[in-house]
Image: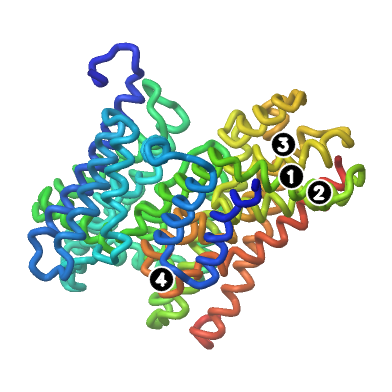
Amino acid sequence: MFFMNPEITFGNKMLELLYIIIGLICIYAGVKNLKDKDNPNRIGTFVFWTALGAATALGKYLPSAAEGVVIVICIIPALLKKVTPGRENAPSKEETQQNFDKIGMKLFIPALAMGIFALIFGLAKPFGMSALVGTGFGVLVAIVLLMIWNKKNTPKVFLDDSERFLSIVGPLSLLPTLLAILGSIFTSAGVGTVIASIVSNVIPQGNVVIGIIVFALGMMLFTMIMGNAFAAITVMTVGIGAPFVLQYVKNPAMIGMLALTCGYCGTLLTPMAANFNIVPVAILEMKDRSGVIKKQVIPALIMIVFQIVWMILHA
Amino acid sequence: MEYLKLLGILVVIVGFALKIDNILIIVIASIVTAIVGGIGPVALLQTVGSTFVANRSMLIFVVVMLATGTLERNGLKQASAALISKIKGATPGAIVNAYGVLRAFFGAFNVGLGGVAGFVRPVVIPMCEGAITSKGLTPDPEHMESVKGMAAGIENITWFFSQVLVVGGSGALLVQGTLADLGYTSDLVQLAGYEVPVCIAAVVVTLVYYTLLDRHDMKKYCGKEGK
């Protein structure tokens, strides 16, 4: 039994507990929508949230092929566009104003608790617990304070409000993990190696300036395709960095490190980096799907130029 | 035919260009890549399952929502507006930038503040709305759309470029490992040090750019009262 095993750190047990809680919240959202007669797609919505919750909560226990099957079950209603929000239970302006008049400015304490406990746990790492567990602990503190200050905040209110927010994000909540999955399929099929071999046929060897420019832009573009600089860095460093740049410069470690932040410029520009660029659009209820990326284009382009120049000057 | 392996990338590029549903693009690209890359159905399911489990931390926003929805219900927007009304002359851009500096500082300690779900939506955006309502104006939806874009943008940019300052952060570990395989030794403190000028440049560039955007927005949507 995982939770009784003394060889597993307390922090890891708490993290696993957190994933079980996340799973249960998703399953609650599924069951609530199944019973919601106002939802046009009760079954599809139920299957999506329940499968996502089961995959998250049971991740430690299921063999990976079975886990894969659960994810496939979860994807099907999302593909068929059968995941929809049900009856909205948004609070009225009068209700929020009344509650605020009762609680007042100390409402900031629970609002900041999540960040503060993430910070404390991240820095001090009590019993090996991470910032992620700290966030979860902060949520707990926030809930307790809200329940003490306002008797109307019953557990059902918290669950229903979280379901409302989950429904706003909808099937997009699965997107970041799906992209990570695509990245690892690319890697196991050997996509990166092929790209590196194509580039090496095009650019001349021995010209460090051209090499740096191609390496930096290659990191940016490949990250845009993969949606993740971590997926791009190994492939690009081995395929382009090493033969065209690293062996000719005094400071290969600097080039290798800055290549990663060149990749981050690509992360800022791509819808493939869904958890950074697409999910916030849904959480903030923006109208323009590219609304976040548009505000990042200019900083990203300035930073790629800055880094290329910096590498050429200091290599 | 090695080049056939790139078919999945083609699917992704064409799919996004044609604005096809994101999830559909990923599913097609995955299946195509698995077929041309010789990955069998069982191995594919195993990859899907194990990658999902390894990336469950991306779902942390779900637990945060357990608190944010009810915080909103209990008047967090009103509280933020009340706080901002006490600060004279604050604009949405100034609030977004102040948040960015805070996030960059904590990011260098590898600590997040709750993300878009846990902080930007419940705290930053209501404060920005408060900055407009405290001038006696109603926030224009297009103006708020721009503010939300900046808030999510500063969240991403400051986080990416400050995280690399963490000594022994996951990015630097990956770079160190890759370089070691190629025969280059590197030191983790040194690797973080290389990123200091990059991080400073990224934060300054973004603060300046968003300040200019904010001035433009305030003039456009808030007119004389916006100054």
Q: Earlier in the sequence, mark 4 or mark 1?
A: 1
Task: Identify which amino acid the numbered label 2 is placed on.
Answer: Asn
Both on one chain, marks 4 and 2?
yes
Both on one chain, marks 4 and 1?
yes
- In the displayed structure, would residue A80 be above or below residue A141? below
Q: Which mark is residue A197?
A: 1
**Place of residue A295 in the rendered image (x, y in percent of width and height, measured from the top left):** 57, 67
**Place of residue B63 in the rendered image (x, y in percent of width and height, measured from the top left):** 28, 45
Regarding mark 3 in the picture, which secondary structure is present there?
helix
Q: Are marks 2 and 1 in contact (CB under 8 Å)?
A: yes
User: Residue drawn at (74%, 44%), measured in percent from left and top?
Assistant: A197
Residue under pointer 2: A201
Q: Is residue A109 visible?
A: no
Q: CA distance from mark 3 to mark 1?
A: 10 Å
Task: Identify which amino acid the numbered label 4 is placed on.
Answer: Met
Q: Relative to the observer, which residue lies in front, A28 or B137?
A: A28
Where, quadrant-wise, is the C terminus of chain B in this rendering? bottom right
Q: CA distance from mark 2 to mark 1?
A: 7 Å
Q: Which chain is home to disc 1? A: A
